[in-house]
Image (tube, helix red, strand yellow):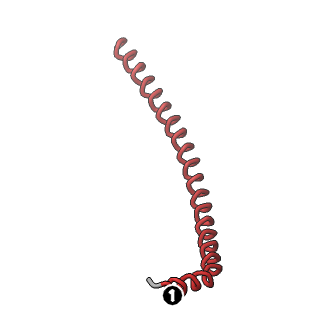
């Protein structure tokens, strides 16, 4: 590029920079808003998952206790039959 072309480009960027800066700030704010929304959703999902895992663990433990009790009962009945 010639010196004159660089001068024109430099002048154009100087004129456009406030508008481009404002546009960039607008876009960054939009992105930040979306990230906040997504973060809130992810947090809710993580809490739900943790609660669901705890509930599953309780259910499986309960089922295992019942199975153990049935095995004991069955072995007791089998031993006396």
Q: x%, y% of residue 65?
A: 47, 26
In the rendered view of the protein, which quadrant contains the N terminus?
Answer: bottom left
Question: How many numbered discs, if any?
Answer: 1
Task: Say which residue appears at 51% left-offset and 41% top-offset.
Answer: 53
**47 relative to 69, above or below:** below
Quadrant of res 26 = bottom right
- In depth, the one of 38 and 55 nearer the eye is 38
Residue 27 position in % (x across, y down): 59, 73
Q: Nearer the viewer, residue 71 or 16?
A: 16
* Residue at 41% across, 19% down: 72
Q: Residue furthest front?
A: 3
What x and y, as percent, mark residue 3?
50, 84
Residue at label 1? 4
Q: Quadrant of the C terminus?
A: top left
Quarter holding residue 16 = bottom right
Above or below — where is 68 with respect to 42? above
**Which residue shows up at 60% across the image and 62% down it?**
37
The image shows residue 24, relative to residue 39, as above or below, that is below
Query: Which residue is depicted at the point 47% across and 34% down?
Result: 60
- In which quadrant of the rendered view does residue 78 lie? top left
Outermost top residue? 80
Quick check: 80 left or right of 40? left
């Amino acid at each position: 590029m010639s010196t004159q072309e660089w001068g024109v480009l430099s002048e154009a960027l100087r004129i456009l920079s406030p508008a481009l800066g404002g546009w960039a700030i607008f876009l960054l704010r939009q992105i930040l808003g979306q990230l906040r929304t997504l973060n809130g959703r992810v947090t809710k999902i993580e809490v739900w998952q943790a609660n669901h895992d705890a509930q599953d663990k309780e259910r499986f433990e309960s089922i295992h206790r019942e199975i153990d009790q049935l095995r004991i009962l069955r072995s007791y009945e089998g031993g006396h039959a």
